[in-house]
Image (cartoon, rainbow, N blue to C red):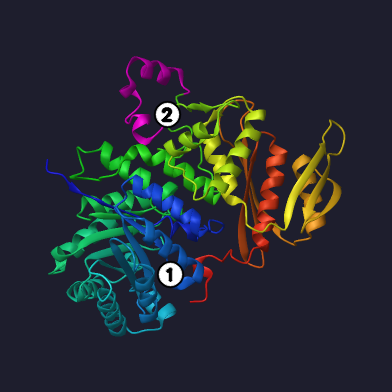
Amino acid sequence: MSTDNLIIFDTTLRDGEQSPGASMTKDEKVRIAKALEKMKVDVIEAGFPIASQGDFEAVKAVADVIKDSSVCGLSRALEKDINRVGEALKNAANPRIHTFIATSPIHMQMKLRMEPDAVLEQAVNAVKMARGFTNNVEFSPEDAGRSELDFLCRVIEAVIDAGATTINIPDTVGYNVPDQFGLLIKNLMERIPNSDKAVFSVHCHNDLGMAVANSLAAVQNGARQVECTINGLGERAGNASLEEIVMAIRTRQDIFTCDTRLDTTQIMNCSRLVSGITGFAVQPNKAIVGANAFAHESGIHQDGVLKNRETYEIMRAQDVGWADNRIVLGKHSGRNAFRSCLKDLDIEFESEEELNDAFARFKELADKKHEIYDEDLRALVSESEAQLESELYKMVSLKVCSETGEIPEATIVMSIDGKEESSTSTGSGPVDATFKSIEKMANSGAELKLYSVNNITTGTDSQGEVTVRLELDGRIINGQGADTDIVIASAKAYIHALNLLENPANRAHPQHADV
C-alpha cells in the first residue's frame, strides 16, 4: 500500500485561543510554537494579526523564531487584513497567508449581506493580494459544510486559478456527519477541473462530537491536510484533536494510505504545556493524553495486558510521550544541574536574572518536597513566567483555620502597591475564606468563573496546580499558582489573576476585537 504525506496544520494558537479564557501572551505563544515545531508540525497558525496589536506582535514573534514549520496568519478577504498578515510574517522562513470568506446562504445573506457573485469576486481578489506576499496561500470558504455545492465548486475553481495552493473546507459549526462530509470532499475533488493543483484540507468543529470522525472521513476521501488543535482546544465544543487524528492514522495504517511526519513522542509534552498555559485541564478519560488513557482497572484487562500488551492496548504509551515521572533533582542539587535538567525539557531562559529567580523558587520547593519531578519543574517555570514586571498585589503571608464544626477563617497579609494591608474573612471552606479576604482588600468586582485544581505529580506531597478564571467587564483572565499547600496555591492563583486584570497589556480574545 503506497503512503503519502498528511499535512498537520495546528491552529491551537489561533482557533484554540478563541476558547473563552484561553487567551495567551506573546511569550506563551512562542513557547507553544517551539514545542509544536519540535513535534514536527507542518503548519502553525499563529493568530489573527488584524484582531489587535497584541495578536499582531504574537504572530510576528512566532514567525521570527520558527524555522522548520510553516508559520501562518489568518485574514478575512480584505486588503487591510492581508497587508497586516503580510507585515507580521515578513521574517518567516516559510510564511503562509490563510484568507477566508463565508459561502453558505445564511452567512452571505445574514452576516455579509452580499450577493454570491460579489463573494466570489472578493475571494479571488483576496487570493491575488495574498500572492503578492507569498506563493503559499490557503483559502477557506467559511461554513462550507452548509454551502450549496454548485456555488462552492465555482468559488474553489476560481481561487485555485487565482493562485490558492491549499483549499480548506471547514465544517464551521460542526453540523456534518462523517459519511456526508467525506462525500463532500470526494465530490469537490472530482467536480472541480483544477482540483489537482491544490491540496484539499479540512477544519472540523466538535459541536456534535464528530470533529475527529469527520476529519478522518475527509482524509479517506482525498483530503491531505487536517486543521486541528492540541487537546481539541477551540471555541464552543472545540476543534478536531491533533493527537487523536495523528494516532488514529498512525495506528490504522491498514486503512489509511497516508501518514504524518510528526514525532509523536512529543504529544504529551505539548498537551501538558497547552493545558498549563490555558488553564484548560485535560479530562482523565480523554483519548491519548488523558490520565486514564493507558490505565487498566478491570482485573480481566490487567491480566491480559500483563500477558501481552496488545490484548487491550492498541498503542504503546511511550509512543505518545507517556513515561514514568523521572526524579531529576533534590534540595542538594546545584545551579548547573538545575539548568541542565531544564535544558533537557527544552526550557531555556533569556537572562541570568530569570534563571536565578527560577532557581530560588526551586530551592524553596525542594525544602518542602523531597523529590522534584519533570512536571514540578514545568510548573515552577510556568509560575516564574507568570510573574509580571509590575505587580500591584503580592502575598506576604496567609493564615487559615479550618476545624470540624467551626466556620473556616482566613487572614491574609498582602502588599498592595508597596504598602502592607491585612484582612480576615470567613467562608464555607478555607479557599472560599481566603478568596473573600483577598477580595475584601482588592475590591475588584470580578466574578469567579472557574476554580480548578490538578495534582502535578502523584503522592501526598505533590504540588497542587490551581487555575482561577475571573471575568470583569467582558475580559476573561486566567490566574495560576502552584504549591504543596493547596490553599496557598489557590491564593497565588487568585492574586495572579487580579494582577493580570490590572495589567493593560492583557487583551481581549481575537473574536472580541473590533476589526
Reading the image, the residue beneath label 1 is: 49
305 inside magenta stretch: yes
User: Is 214 located above or below residue 100 in the figure?
Assistant: above
Q: Which numbered disc, 2 or 1, marks the residue that appears first in the sequence?
A: 1
Helix, strand or loop at label 1? It is helix
Seen from the viewer's position, the closer of residues 479 and 199 is 479
Seen from the viewer's position, the closer of residues 274 and 152 is 274
How crowded is the residue under tag 2: few (<14 C-alpha within 10 Å), some, or many (20+)?
Answer: few
Helix, strand or loop at label 2? It is loop
Residue type, mark 2 in image: Ala
How crowded is the residue under tag 1: few (<14 C-alpha within 10 Å), some, or many (20+)?
Answer: many
Q: Which residues are magenta?
A: 297-323
Q: Residue at x 86, y 39 (%)?
A: 407
Seen from the viewer's position, the closer of residues 333 and 432 is 333
342 left or right, relative to 196: right
Residue type, mark 1 in image: Pro
User: Is 119 located above or below residue 418 in the figure?
Assistant: below
Residue 94's spot in the image, x, y percent? 28, 61
113 left or right, relative to 485: left
User: Is 352 located above or below residue 197 in the figure?
Assistant: above
85 left or right, relative to 355: left
Which of the 4 image quadrants contains residue 121? bottom left
Q: Residue at x 27, y 42 (%)?
A: 249
Q: Residue 323's mark? A: 2
Residue 504's spot in the image, x, y percent? 62, 67
